[in-house]
Amino acid sequence: MKLQYQPPIASITVDCVLFGFIEGQVHVLLIKRGSEPEIGKWALPGGFLEQKESITEAASRVLELLTGVTGVYMEQFHTFGDTERHPVARVVTVGYYALIDAAHHNLKPSWHAEETAWFDISKMPKLAFDHKAIFQLALKTLQKELNISPIIFELLPTKFTLSDLQNVFEIILGRTMDRRNFRRRLKTMDILIELDEVRPGAHVGATLFKFDKKKYKTLQAEGFDFSL
């Protein structure tokens, strides 16, 4: 007699670590939960996977529903399945990190998000569930990715200064970079377009630049090494 297999019962969710560059600092977008469990606590935007959608579709939908943010760069980075990570049920979550130019997105909290707010990554509040661990691994993943791809430009406005660029690298990597070496390396890469513009109100020499995506793709096909 064959035993009938009973599949284990577990729910699947997605959680999004959304990074933004605001007023010279790197921030993460959090929501204040408006429902149980963990009501009133700050958390990463997250929600359950629906029956007829992919994991990536769920991540985009949940982020839009909770914050109003759409059309952003997103990457899946890890699956979290600790048996005690949720106080009510067995829940497995898939983590995504996302990067945006925060100035071009209006936040619109809804669904079970009572409020949304940006928090400096060095001054994070206490988070619900295991979201602190999810955030920390997302940051470590981003640190590694910075050395092999130009995703850093997803955080910056279309036009930026070299000081902006170096500042973002230093904040995320958690270390100071030599200004001359940093700029020398950028010059040899030849992936920036220097504009005939300066930032309004900025000090002398604050020239604006743009990332040359077309040039980068050509170089990438030739085995280009992005590391700084």
Image (tube, rainbow, N blue to C red):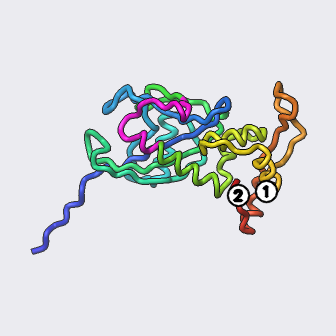
Q: Which mark is residue 207?
A: none
Q: Residue at x 26, y 44 (%)?
A: 89
Q: Is residue 141 left or right of residue 11?
A: right
Place of residue 165 in the rendered image (x, y in percent of width and height, measured from the top left)? 72, 42
Q: Is residue 67 left or right of residue 205?
A: left
Q: Which mark is residue 226?
A: 2
The total number of labels drawn is 2
Q: Is residue 106 left or right of residue 181?
A: left
The residue carrying pointer 2 sits among few (fewer than 14), some (14 to 19) or many (20 or more) residues within 10 Å by Cα, namely some
Q: Is residue 129 magenta?
A: yes
Query: Dot 1: what SS?
Result: helix
Q: Pointer 1 and pointer 2: residues touching (CB < 8 Å)?
A: yes
Q: Residue at x 50, y 47 (%)?
A: 138
Please tell me in which quadrant of the rendered image residue 226 appears: bottom right
Closest to the observer, 178 or 203: 178
Is there any visible trace of residue 191 in the rendered image? yes
Q: Amino acid at mark 2?
A: Phe
Image quadrant where one finds the N terminus: bottom left
Place of residue 179 in the rendered image (x, y in percent of width and height, measured from the top left)? 76, 43
Q: Amino acid at mark 1?
A: Met
Closest to the observer, 166 or 78: 166
Q: Residue at x 32, y 50 (%)?
A: 82
Query: Dot 2: what SS?
Result: loop
Is there any visible trace of residue 68 in the rendered image? no
Closest to the observer, 121 or 110: 121
Location of residue 124 with respect to 7 vertically, above or below: above
Place of residue 184 in the rendered image (x, y in percent of width and height, measured from the top left)? 81, 51
Disc 1 designates what residue? 189
Magenta stretch bounds: 118-135
